[in-house]
Image (cartoon, rainbow, N blue to C red):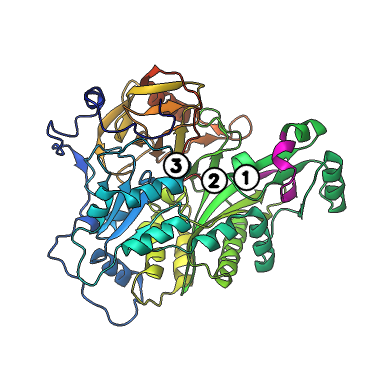
Amino acid sequence: MPNEPRSAGPASPDRQETKPASTSRDGAPADVEVAVATDAAYTGEEAERVQIRRPLRNVSEVRHFFRTNQTPIYFVGATPFNLLGIDRWVRNFSYVTYYDGWDGAHPRVFSPRYKPYVEFESGEAINNWLLLNAEVRAHMTRNVPHGEKVKVAMVFFDEETERICRELGYDLILPSATLRNQLDSKIETTKLGNEAGAFSVPNVLTTSDTYDELNDKAAEAGLGHDLVVQTPYGDSGKTTFFISAESDWQTHKDDIVGEQLKVMKRINNIPVAVEAVITSSGVVVGPYLTELAGFAELTPYKGGWCGNEMKPDVLNAEQRAQTRDLVRKMGEGLRRRGYRGFFEVDVLVDLDNDDCYLGELNPRISGASAITNVTAGAYADVPLFLFHLLEYLDVEFDLDIDEINARWEELSGADEWSQMIIKETAPITEYITHSPLTGQYYLDQYGTLTYKRAALDWHPLQNGSEVFFLRIFGAGDYRWKGADLGVLVTKNPLQTNVGGPDALSIRAKHFIDSIRAMYAGVPVVAEDPAPALGGPGAKGD
């Protein structure tokens, strides 16, 4: 019995019966109502880029450059979630994915038809499998303009990915895997932040083999006895431990002993996610998003990331200024290490004194990108990811980054977006027989979440009564505790602090329950349920 978060193989007749009516009997895409925009992705083939010989000097010229782009650019991943919608801005930008939530109806998403069973152990393994797949290779090299090279972006990659791209003649438009792996360490991030003047919560970098040793070293550093302990690698929800008594040590010591440790004073904080791009013209800093983490309705992992939301009151003016300065300093520190392009910083804001601290660094496209790319600032200029593309494409530019940052800062409170990653939280293993469609939903007059229409992404959403759901696992796949079911995006806050600390709102819980109710499956016996892999770009992995 397959135990991976993937399709078990070619669609069987039973599986085809459970699929949405988005494909015809012969397998060709059927006519469906899909919300498309008159944007860069649908510019006619006769359009030719007017070459601008001098450097691009302003946002208008940047928009023109991407609207007439002839270079094939692919985002490769288990799903297109992180950069879904960028095809609206960049001509010849499309997606190669393992899971296709549209069942062939999205004109810019390609997924191979035949997927023999493979036990993937990481997101990198999924991406490497896709790059090596014969159908994918044929698709990516079809109709490449003379003199152009295929460009590839992704969230998860490694040295093997780089080797594959070199052999196939693709340009992997990302910093090197060696540099990224070095920067992924929370210990290395702390050292880099100290060098750059972007300081962490008061901490000590050490090792500890006993609870007494941990306490002694924390006391020497003036951290007290209520501690937060992190190991170098892995998602923060799984490698961050709260130690305030010996019983906590006993619970987590197997994960702590023998590891390098970042031991921090525990503070009363809110985490804020900020994405940015290092360019030759400076560091572009994106909007501020709060995080959803550890909600039992969304994830079985205590402290695990499960979404983001952007709203006008995420930070006050002083906190925004501190956060922007911290992220800019981290960007300059990364530049000195040879890094360029997209990165994300988790900032911890101390609610007791408004101090802002470096939390974590994610040297990659992150799970927050989906919201960052549809903000008011993005529409005033261009989505943040386009600055990353400028850095890696064959184009010179000389932009006033200070002006762009000032405009994004001014517009930072002008929009509301939220997203949540819905995982299976029940201790089950099932073969999925029915699943919700990818598309736009709305709350009808009876308060029922109802499918409205097919849609390519969440850009058309207008208010908090509408949501976009991107299905990851569908009929014919398996679900188990921890599996990624899908992503829900809405223009409505998902958290509330009415009556106490932040909690999921009543409406958010209703959305979650409604999506779960659309799944049905047949129980199966699992020998060793696998971890959820290849979903929407888990932060810190």
Q: Amino acid at mark 3?
A: Ser
Quadrant where the image shows the N terminus = top left
Q: Amino acid at mark 2?
A: Thr
Q: Could you say whether the residue bearing mark 3 is in a helix, strand or loop? A: strand
- Residue nearest the observer in this picture, 285 or 74: 74
Residue furthest bottom in the image? 54
User: Which residue lies under the disc numbered 1?
Assistant: 270
User: Which residue lies under the disc numbered 2?
Assistant: 290
Q: Is residue 264 magenta?
A: yes
At a point 39% along the width and 50% down the height, the residue shown is: 128
Label 2 vs 3, first from the N-terminus:
2
Q: Which residues are magenta?
A: 252-270
- Residue nearest the observer in this picture, 308 or 30: 30
At a point 32% along the width and 31% down the height, the residue shown is: 442
> What distance separates the C-alpha of mark 1 from that of mark 2?
8 Å
> What distance separates the C-alpha of mark 2 from that of mark 3?
9 Å
- Label 1 close to label 2 by CB (< 8 Å): yes
Q: Is residue 496 magenta?
A: no
Is any part of residue 343 visible from this angle? yes
- Residue nearest the observer in this picture, 278 or 188: 188
Q: Position of residue 124 (x, y in %)?
A: 45, 49
- Tell me: 315 left or right of 2: right
Q: Amino acid at mark 1?
A: Ile
User: Which residue lies under the disc numbered 3?
Assistant: 418
Q: Position of residue 448 (x, y in %)?
A: 34, 23
Q: Is residue 89 above or below residue 103?
A: below
Label 1 vs 2, first from the N-terminus:
1
